[in-house]
Amino acid sequence: MPFTDRQVNALRPKKIRYEVREPGRSGLCLRISPHGEKIWAFRYRYAGDHKRLVFGTYPEVGVADVHLKLAEAKKKLHAGHDPSADALLGTQPVRRQPTIEVLVDRYVEHAAKTMRPK
């Protein structure tokens, strides 16, 4: 039986984060944080690895919307594509680690603003 708004609204936060899986074998789960944030996720296997695709937070992504997103992700998975890889394309900024030279320059600028001369 799929999730309903009534079921999702009834879930309360606990001291630690926990997950509630949708009954059946859909792979859809809802993670509830200690602060009360509810996050939709799809847990699946691709190429022998356990993966997770996050759809968004409730109520911004409602129950009906998450089921549509789940159907799209499952369609990609059955076609042989990784749904999480498709979701990440173009959304992740390129991460660049600062060099030592850049870090030293930042520190010198910070020190000039905050430290008193002797």
Image (cartoon, rainbow, N blue to C red):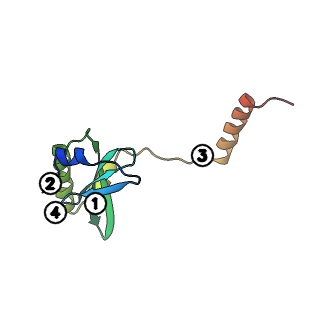
Mark-to-mark CA distance, 1 and 3: 34 Å
Disc 3 target residue: 98
At a point 77% along the width and 31% down the height, the residue shown is: 115
Q: Secondary structure at mark 1?
A: strand
Numbered disc in front, either 2 or 3:
2
- Indicate left or right for 87 with 77 as reference: right
Disc 1 target residue: 43
Numbered disc in front, either 2 or 1:
2
Q: Residues within 10 Å of mark 2 (few under 14, many from 20)?
A: few
Mark-to-mark CA distance, 4 and 1: 13 Å
**Where does the image place residue 32, in percent across and percent down from the top left?**
33, 50
Counting residues from the start of the chain, the first of labels 4 and 2 encountered is 2
Viewer-nearest residue: 58 or 79: 58
Q: Indicate the amino acid at tag 1.
A: Arg
4 and 2 marks in contact (CB < 8 Å): yes
Q: Residues within 10 Å of mark 1 (few under 14, many from 20)?
A: some
At a point 37% along the width and 49% down the height, the residue shown is: 33
- Indicate left or right for 97 with 88 as reference: right
Disc 2 target residue: 2
Mark-to-mark CA distance, 2 and 3: 46 Å
Disc 4 target residue: 24
Mark-to-mark CA distance, 4 and 3: 47 Å
Q: Secondary structure at mark 2?
A: loop
Counting residues from the start of the chain, the first of labels 1 and 3 encountered is 1
Numbered disc in front, either 4 or 1:
4
Numbered disc in front, either 1 or 3:
1
Mark-to-mark CA distance, 4 and 2: 8 Å
2 and 3 marks in contact (CB < 8 Å): no
At a point 18% along the width and 62% down the height, the residue shown is: 78
Numbered disc in front, either 4 or 3:
4
